[in-house]
Amino acid sequence: MKWLFLVHQVYTPNSKERVKVWRAIKKTGAVLYRNSVYVLPYSKERLEDFQWVCQQINDSKGEASIFISNAESGKEDRTLEALFRKARAEDYASLVAAAGHLLRRINAARNRRRTTDGQRDAFHKEYRQIREAFEDIRKIDFFSGSIPKGVIQIMEDISARFASPEHVVSSFVKNYSPKDFRKRLWATREGIHIDRLCSAWLIRRFIDPSAKFVFGAEDALPPNAIPFDVFGAEFGHHGEDCTFETLAKAFRIRDTAIKQIAEIIHDIDLKDHKFGRSEANGLDLVIRSLADSIHDDHKLLEIGSSILDGLYQSFSKQSR
């Protein structure tokens, strides 16, 4: 494998500047390899992340250099990967601890039946912070594979406390008829990538041809819209399924080509290599490249849909 190494020294006695640099490095997902040396698996995007950190270190009267290198052997690769798995396991453990503490306080307040508006607002704010931390960890979880089930469960448990009755997460996916979901407004988080983009394509192609979409901050989505791929939504991650798989099951889409596309999206989104689809890396790279250059989610969906239409036609021909 190819690796990025950031070697740095911060000379400023200002503790705020030191903490600022440390937070910038932590945000990239890098782990400490040696004293003052951090490492990341190579990609152009992560190289840019390190370059921004270098700039920040230089602005703090420090010195920083980036090196790109291959590991000496497969063993060295595995050693480096283990550092990342350990770091992300610790991140998830901290998240579960914080989420568990919040859930116990929510349950205690509900049992006392004395939850004030101020408490509810505080609980919501804390939950949003935990949820944002969860998304941040997912973005830098380069090697761990699927998200620990305990993390998903406790996040869904808390989400269910805030969800409206019609959107509470079920322990199973119900079946629906597409005819009951015509000409609806659908909503998901902005900055769409593989699961949200492909789910929107699936909705418009097989469920609601006249669907309109809203992409925005998760806590500001329209209440009259059908949420998908957000916490607390029925059409989201369930068990080992990504949102695309959940939608396909919920609306009983048994198309062979859709099944193959679902496997590719699962491997990209959950990173657990469950299906071992060789197309996953290619589709992931194409969608990421588009997202880097197109910052309008509606335009990205339009172009991404053309790619998915072609992929669907290709798989359909193969099955015939």
Image (cartoon, helix red, strand yellow):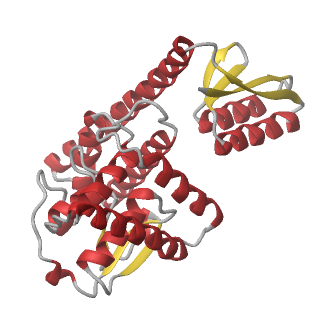
Q: Position of residue 132 (x, y in %)?
A: 46, 49
Compared across the picture, whether 93 is left or right of 54 comes to left
Query: Which of 38/252 is in front?
Result: 252
Q: Is residue 115 visible?
A: no
Q: Which residue is at 87% across, 28% downward?
A: 62
* Image quadrant occupied by the N terminus: top right
Q: Is residue 144 visible?
A: yes
Q: Position of residue 156 (x, y in %)?
A: 25, 48
Compared across the picture, whether 320 is left or right of 297 comes to left
Query: Which of 160/117 is in front?
Result: 160
Relative height, residue 292 to residue 32 (above, below): below
Compared across the picture, whether 108 is left or right of 242 comes to left
Q: Which residue is at 21% across, 61% downward?
A: 256
Query: Which of 64/102 is in front?
Result: 64
The mark total stands at: 0
Question: In the figure, residue 145 lies in which quadrant?
Answer: top left
**Residue at the far right in the pictured view:** 61
Query: Which of 246/97 is in front?
Result: 246
Question: In the figure, residue 17 lies in which quadrant?
Answer: top right
Relative height, residue 163 to residue 47 (above, below): below
